[in-house]
Image (spheres, rainbow, N blue to C red):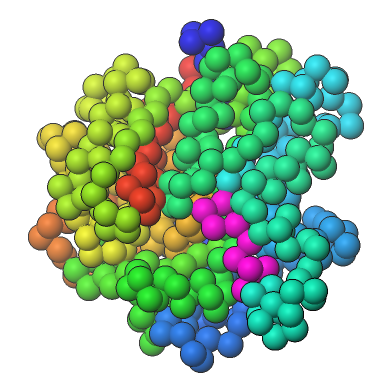
Amino acid sequence: MQDRRVVVTGMAALTPIGLSVESFWQGMMEGKSGAALITKFDASRVATKFACELKGYDPLNYLDRKSARRMDLFAQYAMSVAKDVIKDAGLDPETMSSEDKDDTGVMIGSGIGGMNIFEDQALTLANQGPNRVSPFFIPMLIPDIASGQVSIEFGFRGPNYCAVSACATSNHNFIDSFMLIKEGQAEMMIVGGTEGPVCELGVAGFNSAQALSKRNDSPETASRPFDKTRDGFVMGEGAGVLVLEELGHAVRRGAKIYAEVVGYGLSGDAYHITAPDPEGRGARLAMHRALKYAGIEPDMVDYINMHGTSTELGDIAETQSIKAVFGDQAYKMNLSSTKSMTGHLLGAAGAVEAIATILAIKNGKIPPTINFEHSDPECDLNYTFNQPQEREVNYAMSNAFGFGGHNTSIIFKKFEE
């Protein structure tokens, strides 16, 4: 079964710089920042008063009012992009055969799950007592419910679960789905990540961990990966979902093919619950293993969409690990962090960044790292600062690392029959 090839046949995104794949790409090409003062709650009590919120999103464009009320934001976002990705992939659940539905699975993860309902129901418990806690609290809270809701909505009976690994969540779901198709457990997987963490509890928690930027006087310039004056990441929200499909199945149904998935690597830092290994040993292992799985040399990679969170330690550690793995090629390839524009979408980051990586391959343009002003001598690679760059991309890598020392790398290839 290992010779089964896996391709991407659908993509959909809800991001702070665009509520579709097309507007997301346009936002990246314009170097648009999604950061602004928080509107979802009164931010007067928290140290960081801005985030990358979804702008103009209305769940009622995708869901009926009753269904929307019974889903936390992360599940609403997942259902919304799932509907979009199914259309993009040219699938019609109404006419799909029972066999195809048996062979279609769902893996949409969330790093946190229902943070908003958790905050709301904790206050309800404290103020009104246990009998007032909602019967929908638990199903609205648990991260796996996004996969479950999508499976139920469309009748997909293939593998259905989610991996949860903080900011590496999307990539772990993607890699699991890739392997399920390779091994013949599924023909298609609806896969990605979703997150709706912008609430007072979420911001307060990351502030207490000293993780967020506090550049309140200039939110749009706060996410500045690799810049000497970076001071933390900018929280974002949204979702990204892709359709992974066995190549023969995709060809038989006449699907459009965006790219091929050819490699992945996984590792653990075994170092600290939130800080990266300063020597980048875990990240090096993940990237090295991805190259080995893909059967390619380091000098064949044209672009890396970096994890690049705009934290002091993380950006340096990832830079050092890329130098260690790629040698001279580290200085010849393009790199960028699209988090400079979207903010950090946590469990949704990897899926949205996989879409950005695939679009770079498809369009021959590298999304920029915006907000660069001050050079950091420890970050001295070509991060595609401030402007997109044209470049033919045959192989590209996307990195995602998470609290707990979870490291993931995925390699995409320009599709060739």
Please state which of residues 32 and 118 is positioned toward the viewer in this rendering.
Answer: 118
Considering every residue shown, the one lying at the far left of the view is 377
- Residue at the far front in the pictured view: 130
Q: Residue at x 56, y 66 (%)?
A: 197
- Residue 367 in view (yes/no): no
Question: Along the horizontal axis of the image, is 212 left or right of 322?
Answer: right
Residue 113 colored in magenta in the image: yes
Q: Which residues are magenta?
A: 110-119
Give the residue displayed 44% in from the left and 52% down from the top: 167
Q: Quadrant of residue 206?
A: bottom left
Q: Position of residue 33 (x, y in %)?
A: 46, 68
Q: Who is closer to the viewer here, 360 or 35?
A: 35
Q: Residue at x 48, y 17 (%)?
A: 416
**Can you give x and y, in whole percent of width and height, for residue 177 in the image?**
56, 29
Looking at the image, the residue that sits furthest to the bottom is 44
**Measured along the vertical axis of the image, is residue 173 above or below residue 387?**
above
Relative placement, left or right, of 294 versus 352 is left
